[in-house]
Image (tube, rainbow, N blue to C red):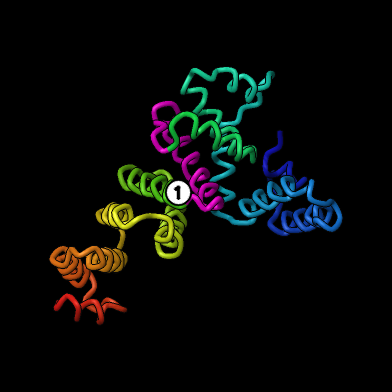
């Protein structure tokens, strides 16, 4: 089982140039025209490793999580964890271990088998491991277009980071990830009620008034569509309190007489 560095064939102190060269060299060998369809899984893993190691912040988080969680053991740690199927603590560790070793299918299978979003991994992992695990899990769910689950995990991470800082400078990337997920991908996958719940859950997480104004505008729009005119007007008024120059709101304001 390989980690990201061994998958690319570079040392842990490799420069960004060395990582890029190694990726290109290996990617050529795994191109479908050369290696055929059988290499699709290997290519996906190679690309996943490169995406992390070529980004300074994500590489830092990966190094921190990997060095802390993955120990050099004299036995097959993964097999041992797999055999503890009735022990939720071992299964939580198995999810994290597999994510760190690019065994995403296996990690998600274990996570879902243990309840998915309802699997309380924070009970079984150290806080740092739990937060790193959740972030990697959210990335994988987003890649698989399972946006609602990714959203729920990211809001949990932001809330926990506000309570007690761990990610520090990296939280900016997590916030951007969450905001892009909401702005570009989430709406198409959820019904009106769930969308409203998602928007409301973003308020009070410590985002800027400008961000909150846009979410309140979106909330006002869906409330109006569902016939809740009074609530839509209240949401729009709250949006304008946060950002009086709120863009793309003129039509909605006219409809609501706000």
Q: Nearer the viewer, residue 59 or 225?
A: 225
**Which residue is under mark 1?**
150
The percent coordinates of residue 35 (x first, y second) are 84, 51
Q: Residue at x 58, y 55 (%)?
A: 56
In the picture shown, does residue 123 fall above or below 32? above
Image quarter (top left, top right, bottom left or bottom right) of the C terminus: bottom left
Mark yes or no: residue 171 visible: yes
Q: Residue furthest right?
A: 34
Q: Quadrant of residue 32?
A: bottom right
Range covered by the magenta-colored residues: 117-146
In the picture shown, does residue 190 fall above or below 118? below
In the picture shown, does residue 26 fall above or below 251? above
Q: Main secondary structure of the magenta part?
A: helix
The percent coordinates of residue 207 (x first, y second) are 31, 59
Q: Residue at x 46, y 23 (%)?
A: 88
Judge the density around disc 1: few (<14), some (14-19), many (≥20) Cα neighbours within 10 Å.
many
Left or right side of 207 for 25 = right
Q: Residue at x 59, y 49 (%)?
A: 59
Image quarter (top left, top right, bottom left or bottom right) of the N terminus: top right
In the picture shown, does residue 177 fall above or below 126? below
The percent coordinates of residue 248 (x first, y second) are 31, 78
The percent coordinates of residue 139 (x first, y second) are 52, 49
């Amino acid at each position: 089982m390989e980690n990201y560095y061994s998958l690319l064939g570079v040392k842990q102190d490799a420069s960004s140039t060395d990582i890029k060269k190694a990726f290109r060299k290996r990617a050529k060998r795994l191109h479908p025209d050369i290696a055929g369809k059988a290499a699709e899984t290997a290519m996906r893993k190679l690309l996943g490793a490169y995406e992390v190691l070529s980004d300074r912040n994500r590489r830092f988080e990966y190094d921190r999580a990997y060095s802390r969680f993955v120990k050099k053991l004299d036995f097959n740690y993964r097999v041992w964890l797999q055999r503890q199927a009735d022990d939720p603590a071992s299964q939580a560790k198995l999810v994290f271990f597999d994510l760190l070793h690019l065994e995403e299918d296996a990690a998600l299978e274990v996570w879902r088998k243990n309840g998915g979003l309802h699997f309380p991994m924070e009970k079984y992992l150290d806080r740092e491991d739990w937060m790193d695990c959740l972030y990697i899990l959210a990335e994988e769910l987003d890649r698989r277009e399972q946006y609602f689950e990714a959203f729920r995990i990211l809001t949990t991470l932001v809330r926990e980071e506000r309570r007690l800082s761990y990610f520090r400078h990296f939280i900016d990337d997590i916030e951007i990830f969450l905001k892009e997920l909401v702005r570009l991908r989430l709406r198409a996958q959820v019904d009106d009620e769930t969308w409203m719940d998602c928007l409301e859950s973003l308020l009070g997480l410590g985002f800027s008034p400008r961000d909150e104004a846009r979410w309140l505008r979106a909330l006002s729009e869906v409330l109006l569509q569902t016939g809740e005119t009074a609530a839509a007007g209240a949401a729009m008024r709250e949006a304008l309190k946060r950002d009086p120059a709120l863009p793309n709101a003129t039509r909605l304001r006219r409809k609501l007489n706000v």
